[in-house]
Amino acid sequence: MATEQKSVAAAVYKAVREPVEALGYSIWDLDYVKEGSEWYLRITIDSEKGVDLDDCEKVMRLVDPIITELDPVEGAYHLEVSSPGLERELRTPEHFQKSLGEEIVLKLFTPVEGRKEWKGRLISAEEDGTVHLEAENRELAIEKKKISRANIYFDFDGMDSEEQEPADLSEKEENRKVK
């Protein structure tokens, strides 16, 4: 991310973090990115109870006037507020710490034991970014510099038809957190 994009994201984060947390949410991620000719300010929120559309709307109504007053960018941009989703991306040390014990998928820049993708249970994440994964009955230690992308793994094929109802998805996510 370019320096200007990082400074916009940092300024917005600083301005909205406390009000968002006062509503009972945390900011999972915040990005200011250009896609085609359009700019997007994306705020991803999370909470212990999960996040639904009403939560996103509530946070959008809260942060929109704060960001408008802050006026962090010249020109137009789209403001989006969303949940991190079931297969949330893990980008920060905090993301990895919150996901200990979860099944994750790591995509790698360089192969580890001949493979560029590993799926397994996240055992630990060190301060230097090294991720310890239990995969295929053994423990792997993978350095941060080798990881291109890390996501929670959600087995959609393992859901029965009753669980596929939209109302049950948040319950399924809650069940996943408990395991």
Image (cartoon, helix red, strand yellow):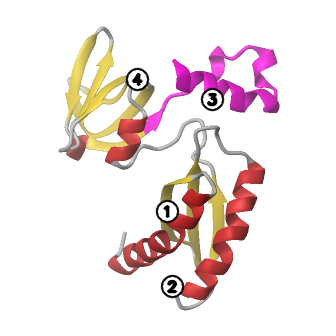
Residue at 31 percent of width and 18 percent of height: 134
Q: How far is mark 3 from mark 2, CA to CA?
A: 35 Å
Q: Do the residues labelled 3 and 2 touch (CB within 8 Å)?
A: no
Residue 155: x and y, percent? Answer: 58, 22
Residue 105: x and y, percent? Answer: 42, 31
Residue type at mark 4 is Gly
Q: Which residue matches tag 4?
A: 101
Q: How far is mark 1 from mark 3, CA to CA?
A: 22 Å
Q: Which of marks 3 and 2 is nearer the N terminus?
A: 2
Within 10 Å of the Cα at label 1, are there few (<14), some (14-19), or many (20+) other Cα atoms? some
Say which element carries label 4: loop
Within 10 Å of the Cα at label 4, are there few (<14), some (14-19), or many (20+) other Cα atoms? some
Give, as a single range, the part of the protein colored magenta. 151-179
Question: Residue 149 versus residue 10: which sits nearer the camera?
Answer: 10
Q: Which residue matches tag 1?
A: 30
Q: How far is mark 4 from mark 2, CA to CA?
A: 38 Å
Q: Which of marks 4 and 2 is nearer the N terminus?
A: 2
Relative to 109, residue 178 above or below: above
Q: Which mark is residue 173?
A: 3
Classify residue 176 as left or right of residue 92.
right
Classify residue 22 as left or right of residue 146.
right
Q: How far is mark 4 from mark 1, CA to CA?
A: 25 Å
